[in-house]
Image (cartoon, rainbow, N blue to C red):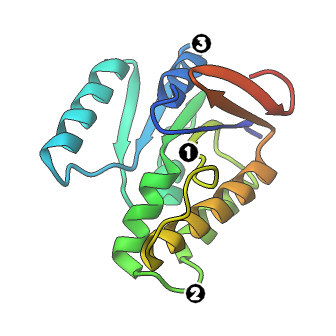
Amino acid sequence: MGRIVMVTGGARSGKSRYALELAGRRNRKAFIATATACDSEMTERIARHRMERAKDFLTIEEPLDVASALGSVPIDTDVAVVDCLTVWMGNLMHRHGTTDKPFPEIDAFLEILKTPPCNLIIVTNEVGMGIVPDNEPGRSFRDLAGSLNARVARAADVVVLLVSGIPLTIKGEKA
């Protein structure tokens, strides 16, 4: 059974870079990318992330069905990086709206975490330490992302919080 490392922190805290460094120690690597190129800034960001990964990773771009993407990684994969849960949550909210009903994609993802197909490094933003959003969709996003993060953290063997680029292990042994 694969080991799960959750990497969290604020925006631009070095989460993705840290996740790639952790995965870099492995031979057969996959990368599950949740972002979509919805504007020029995001297109540039995606291109930059692709260059950082180079050809070391099998990349699967999946903005909605992360569980299926993980299920499709080759059986001999050593590690898969999922980057990132908060972008994924935004995609799901765009599809489903702000609803109190559970998202089936999240349930499927949490189910696969019970028996991961390989070692996983899951990247997410910590969204509960900032200002309270002034609108209902923003508060709903914060609440849903925070709840997802808490559920993934419970499933994870290791949780690392990046603060100003410094990794702090807050659960489990050092990643």
Label 2 sits on residue: 101
- Residue 97: % across, % down: 40, 81
Using the numbered discs, state the Cα–Cα distance from disc 3 to disc 1 in whole angstroms. 21 Å
Label 3 sits on residue: 25
Badge number at residue 70 = none
What residue is shown at x 59% (from left), y 12% (from top)?
Answer: 25
Residue nearest the viewer, comparing 77 with 36? 36
**Type of amino acid under label 2:** Lys
| Upstream in sequence: badge 2 or badge 3 | 3
| Upstream in sequence: badge 1 or badge 2 | 2
**Type of amino acid under label 1:** Thr
What residue is shown at x 37% (from left), y 43% (from top)?
Answer: 60
**Type of amino acid under label 3:** Arg
Q: Quadrant of the C terminus?
A: top right
The reply to whether the C-beta atoms of the residues labelled 2 and 3 are less than 8 Å apart is no
Q: Residues within 10 Å of mark 3 (few under 14, many from 20)?
A: few
Whether residue 65 is visible: no
Using the numbered discs, state the Cα–Cα distance from disc 1 to disc 2 in whole angstroms. 22 Å
- Residue 45: % across, % down: 26, 34
Using the numbered discs, state the Cα–Cα distance from disc 2 to disc 3 in whole angstroms. 39 Å
| Upstream in sequence: badge 3 or badge 1 | 3
Q: Residues within 10 Å of mark 2 (few under 14, many from 20)?
A: few
**121 above or below 100?**
above
